[in-house]
Image (cartoon, rainbow, N blue to C red):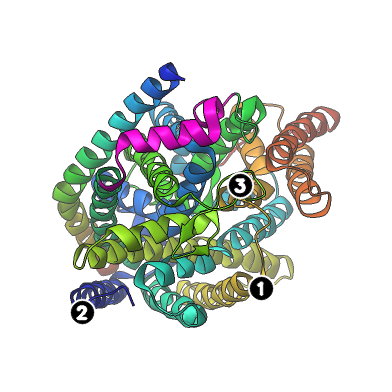
């Protein structure tokens, strides 16, 4: 066991405080709007904290560190694209500002306003499928991190996963977005301290020169240039640009923060400043991965040709290198703070994702289907109950998927492909629906179906590479949208924008 | 290779510095935002 008593005390105090604060959120929830979008009362600073905390998890650190370990400094390109695109979206207000004006609660709700109730249901199904598959690997990867850093026996991985899930489920189910925002704020503070501590520790212990030398000797020029690195290249960079524009505007958990702000102007401000945080969110963990390569990369070459990490004579996988390095370099006390920070990151992401996907299941699938069946509307209280049940369902699926699904490649690329399942079509429909007069429901259906097929079929059945798959999905979605809209001449109703 | 390294080092410095600076501002000013959120939620429950 790597954990000293002081480390356990820090972690337990954090968990207890987080749980108590989360449960307190319940007393402020009166309606479904409070539950899903915190009554649209988010100010800019807490908005930045909750958006950053939602999208910074242990899973984020793990996949970026894995990229750094495998592809060196060239991997920085992925992080820079994510941050710069976010700043552009924030400055221009692309999609987010219009979405906020529409007072949406979920992204698929837009599809009913602009296109048709049927397309909302289809989008809801694709959003939930892509999102839950995406979240499905979180617990396993996060559990691996915790077992390696703390030294808990790997046989207890399932127990660790279950405890993490139960804690975050408790407060998410009770207080919805209000609890998530409160805990996000605390968690953001803690995870930021951990990120800064780990970055300083990693560079100090490894040495900048030895990190550069290791990348030079193992990867050469490819370890620095994203254009010549065979894993990346121009196709990857264009796919990433498209994907990040889609993620920052149409990803349910990100969009929910924009819906929760007090005004469209605040949503733009939140997005812009979080963009700067996103630069560090990606680049700093990639740096940890490079440090882990310099420190532990002495084993035989893996299937990517990268030297595998070795710890105590045992050969590990590249994704395990960063936590193994932390277990080695962090001393008592600091290790406790870092693990508490990582747990904070884990819980903030998972709780937001649970709320995000369960809200889509309840608001965009179950409720519209009930309406179609001619059943009466549910009260706010009944909708909250429905959401809580959806939360439980998502949790059970995530546990199951995490235990039985084996990732075929790098975690980062898997997550982006599962996101592409709905983002390719959703982003196309959002841009077209808001900024192109000829957009219509036929184009919407074509974009959603072709975008999803373009991601699922090549990746899961034809086993194509992620770059080509992602590119194909966005291309097919755009093609389907334009062709469908032009061929189907009937115009759509104007968007209904509610007055403040 | 040297120019790529310089390029990435500059980005890394910008990323690290902005991450730390924004975090400090958010933590200091975010508490007031949270209080305002509670007040707003309480008010809307009472209405």
Instruction: Look at mark 2 in the image and give the residue it sits on.
Output: A5
Instruction: Indicate the quadrant containing the N terminus of chain A: top left, top right, bottom left or bottom right.
Output: bottom left
Q: Nearer the viewer, residue A63 or A418?
A: A63
CB contact under 8 Å: marks 1 and 2: no
Q: Residues within 10 Å of mark 2 (few under 14, many from 20)?
A: few
Q: Give me the C-alpha separation between circle 2 and circle 3.
A: 38 Å
- A491 vs A147, left or right, is right
Both labels 2 and 3 in a single chain: yes
In the structure shown, which secondary structural element does the residue marked by tag 2 occupy? helix
> Which comes sooner in the sequence, label 1 or label 2?
2
Task: Tell me which segment is drawn in magenta.
Answer: A205-227
Q: Is residue A294 magenta?
A: no
| Disc 1 chain ID | A
| Disc 3 chain ID | A
**Whole-percent x, y for residue A69 in the image:** 49, 45
CB contact under 8 Å: marks 2 and 3: no
Instruction: Look at mark 3 in the image and give the residue it sits on.
Output: A413
In the structure shown, which secondary structural element does the residue marked by tag 1 occupy? helix
Say if residue A265 shows up in the picture: no
- A118 vs A112, left or right, is right
**Whole-percent x, y for residue A482 in the image:** 76, 29
- A445 vs A180, left or right, is right
Looking at the magenta stretch, what is its main secondary structure? Answer: helix
> Which comes sooner in the sequence, label 2 or label 3?
2
Q: Nearer the viewer, residue A80 or A499?
A: A80
Vertical side of A325 occupied by A284: above or below: above
Instruction: Look at mark 1 in the image and give the residue it sits on.
Output: A404
Vertical side of B16 occupied by A354: above or below: below
**Whole-percent x, y for residue A59 in the image:** 47, 57
């Amino acid at each position: 066991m790597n954990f000293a008593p002081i480390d356990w005390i820090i972690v337990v105090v954090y968990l207890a405080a987080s749980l108590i604060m989360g449960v307190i959120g319940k007393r402020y929830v009166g309606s479904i709007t409070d539950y899903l979008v915190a009554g649209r009362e988010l100010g800019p600073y807490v908005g930045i904290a909750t958006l950053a905390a939602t999208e910074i998890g242990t899973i984020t650190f793990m996949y970026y560190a894995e990229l750094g370990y495998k592809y060196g400094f060239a991997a920085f390109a992925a992080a820079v694209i994510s941050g710069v695109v976010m700043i552009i979206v924030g400055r221009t207000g692309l999609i987010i500002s219009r979405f906020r004006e529409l007072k949406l609660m979920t992204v698929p709700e837009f599809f009913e306003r602009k296109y048709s109730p049927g397309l909302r249901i289809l989008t809801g199904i694709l959003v939930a499928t892509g999102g839950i598959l995406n979240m499905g690997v979180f617990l396993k990867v996060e559990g691996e991190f915790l077992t390696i850093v703390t030294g808990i026996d790997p046989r207890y991985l399932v127990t660790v996963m279950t405890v993490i899930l139960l804690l975050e489920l408790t407060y998410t189910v009770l207080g919805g977005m209000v609890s998530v925002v409160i805990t996000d704020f605390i968690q953001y503070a803690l995870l930021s301290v951990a990120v800064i501590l780990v970055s300083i520790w990693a560079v100090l212990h490894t040495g900048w020169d030895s990190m550069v030398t290791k990348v030079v000797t193992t990867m050469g020029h490819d370890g620095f240039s994203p254009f010549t690195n065979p894993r990346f290249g121009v196709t990857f960079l264009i796919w990433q640009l498209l994907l990040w524009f889609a993620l920052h505007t149409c990803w349910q958990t990100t969009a929910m923060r924009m819906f929760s702000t007090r005004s469209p102007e605040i949503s733009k401000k939140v997005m812009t400043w979080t963009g700067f945080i996103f630069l560090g969110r990606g680049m700093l963990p990639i740096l940890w991965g490079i440090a882990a390569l310099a420190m532990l990369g002495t084993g035989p070459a893996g299937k990517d040709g990268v030297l595998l990490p070795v710890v105590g004579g045992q050969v590990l996988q590249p994704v395990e290198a960063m936590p193994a390095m932390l277990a080695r370099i962090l001393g008592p006390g600091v290790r406790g703070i870092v693990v508490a920070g990582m747990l904070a990151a884990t819980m903030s992401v998972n709780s937001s994702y649970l709320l995000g996907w369960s809200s889509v299941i309840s608001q965009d699938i179950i409720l519209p289907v009930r309406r179609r069946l001619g059943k009466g509307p549910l009260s706010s209280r009944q909708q909250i109950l429905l959401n809580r049940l959806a939360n439980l369902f998502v949790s059970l699926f995530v546990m199951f998927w995490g235990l039985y699904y084996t990732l075929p490649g790098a975690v980062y690329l898997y997550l982006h492909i599962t996101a592409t399942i709905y983002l390719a079509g959703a982003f196309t429909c959002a841009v077209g629906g808001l900024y192109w007069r000829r957009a219509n429901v036929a184009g919407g259906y074509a974009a959603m179906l072709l975008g999803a097929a373009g991601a699922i079929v090549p990746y899961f059945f034809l086993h194509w590479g992620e770059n080509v798959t992602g590119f194909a999905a966005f291309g097919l979605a755009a093609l389907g949208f334009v062709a469908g809209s032009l061929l189907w001449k009937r115009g759509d109703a104007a968007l209904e924008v509610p007055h403040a | 290779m040297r120019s790529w390294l310089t390029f990435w080092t500059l980005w890394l410095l910008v990323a690290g510095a902005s991450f730390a600076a924004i975090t400090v501002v958010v933590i200091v000013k975010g508490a007031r935002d949270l209080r305002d959120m509670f007040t707003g939620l309480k008010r809307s429950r009472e209405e």
